[in-house]
Amino acid sequence: MSKISVTAVIVSFCLSALSGPLLIPLLRRLKAGQTVRNDGPATHLKKTGTPTMGGLLILFSVVVTCLPYLDRYPKVTPVLFLTVGFGVIGFLDDYIKVVCRRSMGLSPLQKFTAQLLVTGIFACYLLKYTDVSLAMRVPFLEGRYLDLGIWNVPILFFIVLGTANGTNFTDGLDGLAGSVTVIIAVFYTVIAIGTGCGIEPVTCAVVGALMGFLLFNVHPASVFMGDTGSLALGGFVAACGYMTQTPLFIAIVGVIYLAEVASVILQVGYYRLSGGRRLFRMAPLHHHFELCGWSETKITALFAVATALMCLAALAAYGTQ
């Protein structure tokens, strides 16, 4: 691991860890407390009022850490843009909901339109200002790339939006989204350093920022990341996938994101087709395990271990090429 990578992790961790005691009281003064849905698990009702928008800690730490590297590592820029772009969308949604006291936040159309705009700018930047190909490495098939021609761009939109919203669904338990994503960030750090693709400053910054954030977000959480953090992390993972030509690997390393999204889709579909019956006790998937009697810490540990194992499988898939 290079000196630059180690420095980025340490600096970002310190910024995140030291900013927490400053930001959390400020969020409390703004009364930026989480509103827990009544139809969720009853154990979550005690979390009402816990400060949210803690994703600002992550964004601040990552941006400040990466700024000195932008000249030497230009490929950090699109990753940072997609991360911050989705983070801003999440922040607006959080701010409207918890500070302005409008329960809807951004409307689904507003949120989707903003996500399309940010993703479109990211795609244009890749095509016009970088040498990054939209062809995708195929896991476990040596030297094979999937190039869909004109369909590469629509597929990019699908993967970016799917990853961002999958991460958003995963943010439902103390420490869950952060624990899963820090492991994925380590995976992309290994890939970035191994291939010399030039994005390791931002992947390391995210590793450090999440480690610092988890000091305040593990059970019992004193702050939640909110959409500010979860959408930003989804944008980060999707951007890393494209900058390393491994968007297909997101289905492996992001298996938890995929499972969470799939559980919601299956729940809604089965409910409608069966006339009101449920496939899971509750969706997303982590709530199903809660209602089966599992503790938050056990579910978070299980999902983190599953992510670590799938990252190892992805490294094996990458190493065969």
Image: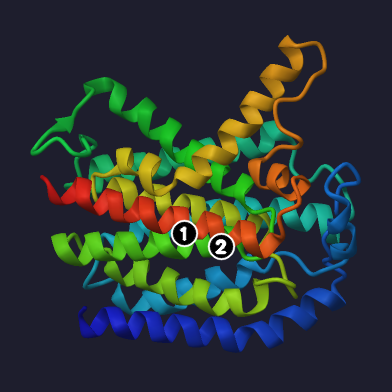
Residue 84 is at least partly visible in this image: no
* Badge 1 amino acid: Val
**Toward the viewer: 168 or 172?**
172
**Toward the viewer: 129 or 254?**
254
Residue 146 occupies quadrant? top left
Q: Secondary structure at mark 2?
A: helix
Residue 7 is at least partly visible in this image: yes
- Against 228, residue 280 (above or below) is above
- Where's residue 260, x and y in %? 59, 40
State yes or no: discs 2 and 1 in contact (Cβ < 8 Å).
yes
- Where's residue 7, x and y in %? 32, 86
Residue bearing the label numbered 1: 305
**Toward the viewer: 21 or 40?**
40
Check the image and tell me how it is coloured. rainbow
Task: Work out which quarter of the rendered image holds the C terminus and state it.
Answer: top left
Residue 109 occupies quadrant? top right
Q: Residue at x 54, y 38 (%)?
A: 259
- Against 48, residue 289 (above or below) is above
- Against 39, residue 304 (above or below) is below
Q: Secondary structure at mark 1?
A: helix
